[in-house]
Image: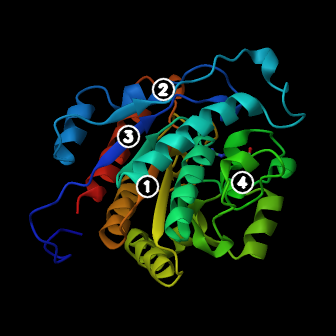
Amino acid sequence: MSDHQNNQPAEHVAPEVKIFSSGLRLGTGRTGDSGAANAVLSGGMDRLLATRLQVKALDYTPVELPHVTEDQIHQDHPRLKYLEPIRQHDFKLKDGVFNALQEGKIPFTIGGDHAIAIGTLAGVLEHSASEGKQVFALWFDAHTDINTPSGSESGNVHGVPLAVAQGHTEGLFEDFYPSQHFVQGPHSAFVGVRSIDPPEEELAQQAGMHLFRASRLKEIGPEWPVQIAEEVSELYRNSGASHFHFSFDLDGVDPSVAPSVFTDVPGGPSLAQALRFVEELMARVRVDSMDFVEFDPALDNAAGDGLRAAQMVVSKLVEGLRK
Ligand SMILES: NC(=[NH2+])NCCC[C@H](N)C(=O)O
């Protein structure tokens, strides 16, 4: 939607955005630094984003990765992989996100796998608790990431963050939520879902979460980005929540266009449709915090299609923040 159609003034006031970056891959069960954020911000992207945000340089904070060796995989938990190092990493990210919000900035975390969202959402929830606000979380993703820690089949922490943020802390993440403020089931929406584990399906139904599956998008046809953006913004408006967190997982896009993800599931929207959805949504909803996750340069094809897709999404997300 153009500014004209949206009746917004031509002059934009640049929001203050604080970018966090993380090369976390432990949430997929793999050690090492993915270097994703550096790759995404390479090739002049940092300058482009700074221009879009109308600032001289990006306020850019890398979150340090703990040094981890493969023998630590089940050191802290019989099922969840690399639990303690992920907790350490995410706790730092939580503090950063919380402080950015307290300073009136929009935190944007470029991951990293989706396990980073335990940290980002914990920071968002602590901030919102201090302001008496409820949080609405939107996942653009092939998955729902609502496995409870004890219910996760794979043991990969990137499959649990939204269950944890809904209060399924199970004695493992209590220290992340001193205010015991969580995302309510009906304040969670998912767009592009096509891989959901049976316990996740059950929890989604029980808790009243809103699933916009890939099959539904196909039924609607090419105009789904407009319709779903409208439906999500309507849900948000009627929810009583007043903080909108947008978590964009690159695997939500079809793997033929974004081959650079760990858990690829065919049958997703095209890149053009995903970008259009971001645009339509952000024309309707003021996003207060964001994540971009699951891009891994090591998994990209020789043509660099994944990097291209990642940069286009990140750039569109930042563009959407202009008000
Ligand atoms: N953010 C992601 N890519 N999540 C994938 C999760 C896959 C699967 N449901 C699991 O829990 O292991």
Say if mark 3 contacts mark 2, CB within 8 Å. no
- Disc 1: which residue: 289
In three-dimensional space, the C-alpha distance between marks 3 and 2, rounded to whole angstroms, equals 19 Å
Q: Taking 87 as reference, is 32 above or below it?
A: above
- Disc 4: which residue: 164
- Disc 3: which residue: 19
In three-dimensional space, the C-alpha distance between marks 3 and 4, rounded to whole angstroms, equals 23 Å
- In this rendering, would 81 be left or right of 131? right
Q: Closer to the camera, 62 or 252?
A: 62
- Disc 2: which residue: 297
- In this rendering, would 44 be left or right of 18? left
Question: Considering only order in the chain, which callout, 2 or 3, is on the residue closer to the N terminus?
Answer: 3
Question: Considering only order in the chain, which callout, 4 or 1, is on the residue closer to the N terminus?
Answer: 4
Crowding near pointer 4: few (<14 within 10 Å), some, many (20+)? many
In three-dimensional space, the C-alpha distance between marks 3 and 1, rounded to whole angstroms, equals 10 Å
Picture coordinates of residue 216 (x, y %)? 57, 72
Residue at image coords 72%, 14%:
69
Quadrant containing the N terminus in the rendered view? bottom left
Residue at image coords 76%, 33%:
83
In three-dimensional space, the C-alpha distance between marks 4 and 2, rounded to whole angstroms, equals 27 Å
